[in-house]
Image (spheres, grey):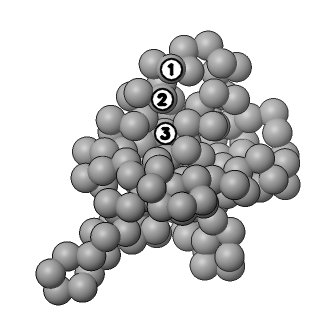
Amino acid sequence: MSIEERFQKAVELNQKGYNCCQAVTAVLSDQTLLMEEQLFHISAGFALGMGNMEGVCGALIGAVIIAGCHTEGKGSVKYAKQISETFQQKCGSITCKVLKSKDASGNVFCPCHQCIKNAVASYSEIIGLDNQ
């Protein structure tokens, strides 16, 4: 699956009601030994910055979960930091509350679909994708 196909599928999943973390983990499920359905369950609680919009963006959490699975935990902290830094460069923040805040004209700083795309892209840039 190309990265563009991953972006499209992730956004579609989010539009169907899956949270940002679920959308990211689902489109990267081939990077793990887990099934998409298992990842939906694992990532269910990481919506809205872990349930309250105060925490880390769920899309970013999804990318870090997959990195840990893909690397079997080897270097997880290093990869989490690198993915987070890349995501922050793309989105301007890693915190859901900030990302969902509105500017003076009422536009969301970084909409969920863009956070999802940026999380997948950040994973790809740091870890790489096996099936491009």
Q: Is residue 44 left or right of residue 84?
A: right
| Image mark for residue 80 | 2
Position above or below: 12 against 124: below
Q: Are marks 2 and 1 in contact (CB under 8 Å)?
A: yes
The residue under the point 55% across, 44% down is: 61
Mark 3 or 1, nearer chain start:
1
Q: Can residue 36 be seen from the camera position used here?
A: no
| Real-space Cα separation, disc 3 to disc 1, in angstroms | 14 Å
Label 1, secondary structure: give it.
helix
Position above or below: 98 against 28: below
| Image mark for residue 123 | 3
Q: Is residue 8 or residue 73 the one in the foreground?
A: 73
The residue under the point 42% across, 35% down is: 83
Can you identify the residue that label 1 sits on? 77
Q: Position of residue 30 (x, y in %)?
A: 72, 42
Circle 3: residue type: Tyr
